[in-house]
Amino acid sequence: MVGKIPGILMASASDLGSTDDYEALMSMTDVELLKRAWRQEKAAPEILQFESRLIKRVREQIQLMEETVEEFTESGFDPLTVSLYQMDLDRTQFLLRSYLRIRLQKIEKYMFHIFATAELLTRLSKEEKWFIERCCVDLQTHLEKSVLSQLPYTYQSIFQQSVINDETDMVAKPQLDTFIVCKTKYYLGHIQLEDNADGEPDGSEEICRGRED
């Protein structure tokens, strides 16, 4: 199947924080890794680091599977086997498209915030950086010509309600103060979570805020 094609490399140990994580990840296929990245991106309010190496491998796998399905179809291979390969291919394509679409939606929603934040900008792919730059320039130019130029000077900013105010209160930002549920996979040691100063044992669950003040 597409996720188990021999010769496709997994992520390196530098991507992980522990030996246990590395061993667990090495046992996962690229499709499973893509599914995990898709889930994380879907659940996170802010945009996460683009999985460039994983996406490159998945695209290579998709191309290989497309060639395999076409070859099997032309050679009269067992239709059931061909359909299974096609199902695996369709699943992988769905995950990849959905992953990229979720990131694109975040970029469109928070474009000015991301573009003005160096840390967030480094999380984007080369294509995403080009896209967000063009979007910011085009949208700002459009608003200035169609709306802002007709307003008094103090209200001509697309980032602030008034130029008197230094805060960028008109820039959409992700809500990071929401509560999240964490579940530990292994003992993490002494960690301060809200009022709980004890280390969490394996498999324990904790509710905390996504961002600490």
Image (cartoon, rainbow, N blue to C red):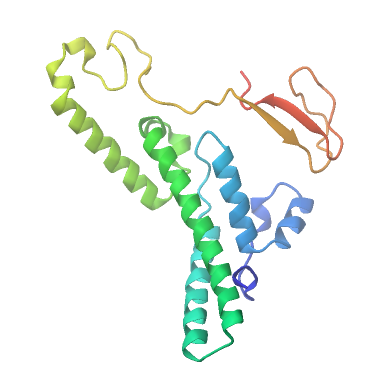
What residue is shown at x 43% (from left), y 50% (from top)?
125
Between residue 16 and residue 103, name the one nearer to us: 103
The residue most toward the right is: 201
Q: In this view, does 163 lie to the left or right of 61?
A: left
Residue at point 42%, 41% (across, down) = 105
Q: Which residue is drawn at 51% across and 58% down?
A: 94
Residue at 84% x, 32% y: name it.
Answer: 200
Q: Residue furthest front?
A: 79
Q: Which of 162 and 69 is in front in this view?
A: 69
Count of numbered badges drawn on the protein: 0
In the image, taking residue 194 as reference, residue 121 lies left or right, namely left
Place residue 166 in its image quadrant.
Answer: top left
Residue 172 location (% of width, % of height): 40, 26
Vertical placement of residue 69 versus 17, above or below: below
Does 29 appear above or below 45? below
Left or right: residue 21 compared with residue 92? right
Query: Percent x, y for residue 170?
Result: 35, 20
Percent x, y for residue 89?
53, 68
Above or below residue 188? Residue 50 is below
